[in-house]
Amino acid sequence: MIKKIDHLGIAVTKLEDAIPFYRDILGLAYHGQEEVADQKVKTAFFEAGDVHIELLEPTSPDSPIAKFIEKNGGRGGIHHIAYAVDDVADSLAKLTAKGVALVDKAPRAGANNKLIAFLHPKSSAGVLTELCADKK
Ligand code: ZN
């Protein structure tokens, strides 16, 4: 079901403040910014070999990322791990059958023209876990 780690999601208070570290200091290839209205975030993607780094800045105080930063003492940090799968809906059905708690019961639109869904951290050792697949 899982093909590989697709990306690591990192919450930041401001993309502009975080981008230079990843782009200029680490020298990762920068793939630009995108707003994901559904999740009330702006994202910036970088390439680290086969894995991407997704920076997430909240666009609204009720964004899940704004709440994460608030709980984290006003700082950003690692927010989620995303695994690439062939089919998000099919994976959700298989995980539900195994008793895994879900945040998203159906796939929704994510950044980079992907379908995504989050699993509940109570079923994933406390780590917010995302499944993602290219839209077909
Ligand atoms: Zn993600």
Image: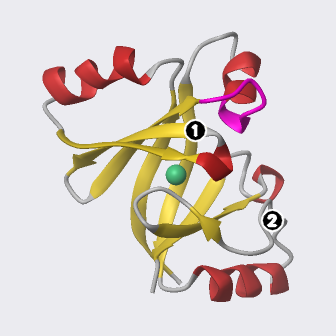
- Give coordinates of residue 4: x percent, y percent: 40, 69
Over which residues does the magenta segment extend?
59-65
The residue that mark 1 highlights is 41
Q: Which mark is residue 84?
A: none
Nearer the viewer's eye, disc 2 or disc 1? 1
* Mark earlier in primary sequence (2, 1): 1
Determine the residue positioned at 47% across, 56% down. Answer: 111
Instruction: Look at the image and say whether residue 62 sits in the magenta stretch.
Output: yes
- Residue 84 lies, in percent from the top left, at 46, 71
**Residue 101 inside the magenta-drawn segment:** no
Q: Residue furthest top?
A: 73
Q: Residue at x 61, y 30 (%)?
A: 59
Q: Which residue is mark 2?
A: 102
Mark 1: C-beta under 8 Å from nearest atom of ligand 1: no
Taking the spot 69% from the left edge, 28% from the top edge, the residue there is: 60
SS under mark 2: loop
Q: Is residue 50 left or right of residue 37?
A: left
Label 2 vs label 1: CA separation? Answer: 21 Å
Q: Main secondary structure of the magenta part?
A: loop
- Residue 120 lies left or right of residue 27; in this view the side is right
Tell me the SS state at disc 1.
Answer: strand
98 is higher (above) or lower (below) than 104? below
Q: For residue 87, what is the image quadrant? A: bottom right
Q: Identify whether 103 is placed above or below 91.
A: above
Tell which of 29 and 96 is nearer to you: 29
